[in-house]
Amino acid sequence: MLPDTSEREVVGADDGQARAIAQSRAARRRRLAGINVVRVLLVVAVLGSWELAATHWIDPFYYSKPSAIWGRLVDWFTTGTSQGSIWTQIAVTLEEALIGFALGSVGGVVLGIVLGRSRFLSDVCAPFIKAANAIPRIILASLFVIWFGLGMSSKVATAFVLVFFAVFFNAFQGAREVDRNLVNNARILGASRMQVLTTIVVPSATSWILASLHSAFGFAIIGAVVGEYSGADKGLGLLINHAQGTFDSAGIYAGMIIITVIALLAEWLLTLLERRLLRWRPPASSLEAQI
Amino acid sequence: MPTQATPDGPAIELRGATKRFRSSSGGVHTAIRDLDLTVKSGEFVAVVGPTGCGKSTTLSLVSGLEPASEGQALVHGRPVVGIPEGVGYMFQNDAVLPWRSVLDNVATGPRYRGLTKRAAREKARDWVERVGLGGFESYYPHQLSGGMRKRVALAQTLVGEPSILLMDEPFSALDVQTRSLMQDELLRLWSGTGTARGAAVVFVTHDLEEAVVLGDRVVVMTAGPATVKASFDVPLERPRDAEEIRLTPEFLDIYREVWESLRGEVQITRERGAGNAA
Ligand SMILES: Nc1ncnc2c1ncn2[C@@H]1O[C@H](COP(=O)(O)OP(=O)(O)OP(=O)(O)O)[C@@H](O)[C@H]1O
Ligand SMILES: [Mg+2]
């Protein structure tokens, strides 16, 4: 009765097909292995030549070298930093970033969707938002230290501002571009205004919002670190600031590496969340070929 | 089925309905002008007309999605303000929710109307079966063929047991075989023991054959701005078999008659198009 062309798995695939599938899998595995080998070689080459150059030709006082950075990392994690345990610094920065991220993305999503759905409000607010967005926001970090003091709130505020705008514009765009057809269909099916918002607008905007959350967490960490850099009593930014003060270039690199690892972990978590929330989307064809 | 204000009165009435749009160049574009149309309860009216003449606009007036600029739209004898109770509308373009499975798509309407998730799904499951999608409940729209998506949209609309069913070229994107299959199923669902029985249907189509196969009456619209040019009763017996009936002489007679009327309007539209292109 039904055309079963949409069956995703071919049931009872013949031998030829099975062989073709096995072959293409093997080819893919070989390709991936090749890529990974070259990657490792690249890293070894870069680090090795850096180490070599810093040992023989360039001044490691300015440029540091991989072994020194590694030593600093080990030192921080085993005996602690000049500001106390490294874990405390990481926890403090992470907490600031997370709070700023949460507040900023909730604020950005809510305001973005409200303005995206209301022509009047968005027309009223457009010039103010453009102006606010044009402010170099990093400078606000200094202002926030004056307003909120050296504690956590000034860093949260910096992270919030950076995250908010990144998320706001995407949520706004996402809410704007909702398919009119879907909204009309929902209205015909009996949806109230609120139901249209929650069941049509928000899910439509979700892919836009999630896309912005990826970069937004990076911004949250930048906000927290820059905030700490401008004045703080704890955190990774302070650590880096301190390393700079003592001309400890290995310390700066080490701080950078820790922040990068945190950002990558967060990125990975967000990707998992995205996969979960966007299950309904056709798998991007590039995913198969993705490296 | 929702109670009707005037049980014997017409289900749908358009009285001198006119709809104007502001065009992008700042002028005013009249999509339909002075249109009178009456559809009785339980009547299946097929509407044909040249492309762009204002067929979709006519449906949007009945559905309450757009207000008339002049004249009146009445549903069950009451002027249309907002979306009238008991109206189902299958849009020209796909309107299934891509982020919901087949079952949840069909359950959408009942959920909006306040049923619990469970009750809504129960109801939806029944309709998913009826449109022949049993076994595909958990599929997402992107995993379905175009014809299957149309079935989802059909179930989504029919689950609300509308007393008025507006359909805007619902099958035009389908291949010929699937289309006649869907036509048969629509007729079965509409006239059969289903709850859609007795719904007044306005079925817009480009396909004159489809119009004659399905309709009790075929309404021909003029080239835009649309008004009703002529209305033809289709004297074919029900139940009809969409495949078989096309070959009967009665079918060909009425087809020819309607085409005589429609041809002029299509000609006008074509010449306008050529004029625009020149
Ligand atoms: N929202 C709108 N704003 C401006 N013009 C519109 C709008 N909706 C429709 N029109 C215009 O009204 C006219 C009729 O449109 P409509 O969609 O009703 O045609 P149609 O008969 O359904 O055409 P088709 O058979 O191609 O679907 C067209 O010229 C179209 O450009
Ligand atoms: Mg149309």
Image (cartoon, coloured by chain):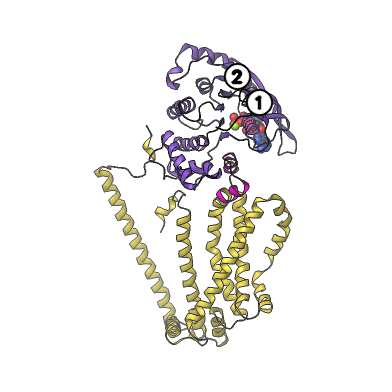
Chain colours: A yellow, B purple
Residue B263, relative to residue B12: is it above or below?
above
**Label at residue B187:** none
Which residues lie in the magenta part?
A182-199
Residue drawn at x 62%, y 79% as measured from the top left: A230
Outermost residue toward the right?
Answer: B27
Task: Assess disc 1: are there few (<14), some (14-19) or many (≥20) residues with their C-alpha within 10 Å of its C-alpha.
Answer: many
Query: Can residue A221 be spotted in the picture?
Result: no
Q: Classify mark 1: helix, strand or loop.
A: strand
To which quarter of the image does residue A47 belong? bottom left
Amino acid bearing label 1:
Glu
* For the residues bearing labels 2 and 1, Cβ distance under 8 angstroms: no
Residue drawn at x 46%, y 43% as measured from the top left: B121
Depth order, front residue of A166/B101: B101
Depth order, front residue of B197/B236: B197
Residue B218 appears at what percent x and percent y? 57, 20
Q: Is residue A193 magenta?
A: yes
Horizontal side of A171 relative to A79 (left or right) equals: right
Q: Which residue is mark 1?
A: B13
Query: Can residue B56 be spotted in the picture?
Result: yes
Q: Chain of mark 1?
A: B
Residue B265, relative to residue A47: is it above or below?
above
| Image region (quadrant) for ligand 2 | top right
Amino acid bearing label 2:
Leu
Residue drawn at x 46%, y 49% as measured from the top left: A280
Horizontal side of B251 relative to A148 (left or right) equals: left
Task: Assess disc 2: are there few (<14), some (14-19) or many (≥20) residues with their C-alpha within 10 Å of its C-alpha.
Answer: many
Main secondary structure type of the part rendered in magenta: helix
Residue B131 appears at what percent x and percent y? 44, 34
Q: Is residue B42 magenta?
A: no
How many tags in the picture? 2
Q: Which residue is mark 2?
A: B262
Residue A118, relative to residue A185: is it above or below?
below
